[in-house]
Amino acid sequence: MNQKTPSAIYAACERLTRPVPTYRVLLTKRELEIVAVLVDAPTNKEIGRKLGIAEPTVETHLMNITRKTGIATRLGIFALGVRLGLIPISHETY
């Protein structure tokens, strides 16, 4: 992931205004899987390899995630994954 300024991080987190269960209903199982692997597979190619799908399919799923949530950056999608409990954050992780 690219290094972001504090204001960019704040703006990305600010977009997460819906309650968490709403996002779980909006996103398909595959879209949630893509959010979950984002931390270990930062490129579309790596996400596709990890999930056994083509890179254009990953791009389509990411566009759908953006369309459904209004979150247009990987940082924002990462923050959503943390909020949904799909991406664990601990001192040992980083």
Image (spheres, rainbow, N blue to C red):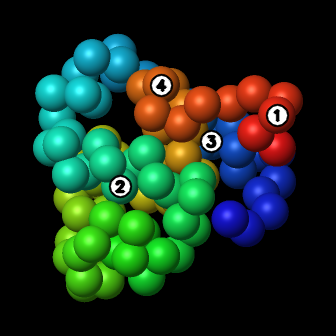
For badge 2, the amino acid type reads Ile
Q: Mark 1 points at which residue?
A: 92
Return the disc, 1 or 3, that comes first in the chain's sequence.
3
Looking at the rendered structure, the secondary structure element under dot 4 is loop
**Is 57 or 5 nearer to us in this picture?**
57
Q: Name the residue under label 4.
A: 85
Question: Residue at the location (68% across, 65% down)?
Answer: 1
Q: Which of marks 1 and 4 is in front?
A: 1
Return the disc, 4 or 2, that comes first in the chain's sequence.
2
Mark sitting on residue 11: 3
**Is 58 or 14 nearer to us in this picture?**
58
Return the disc, 4 or 3, that comes first in the chain's sequence.
3
Does residue 70 appear to the left or right of 84 in the view shown? left
How far apart marks 4 and 2 lie (CA) works out to 13 Å
For badge 4, the amino acid type reads Gly
**With respect to residue 55, does 32 lie above or below?**
above
Return the disc, 1 or 4, that comes first in the chain's sequence.
4
**With respect to residue 7, does 46 lie above or below?**
below
Q: Where is residue 65 in the image (x, y as percent from the top left)?
A: 28, 52
Return the disc, 3 or 2, that comes first in the chain's sequence.
3
Q: Quadrant of residue 69?
A: top left
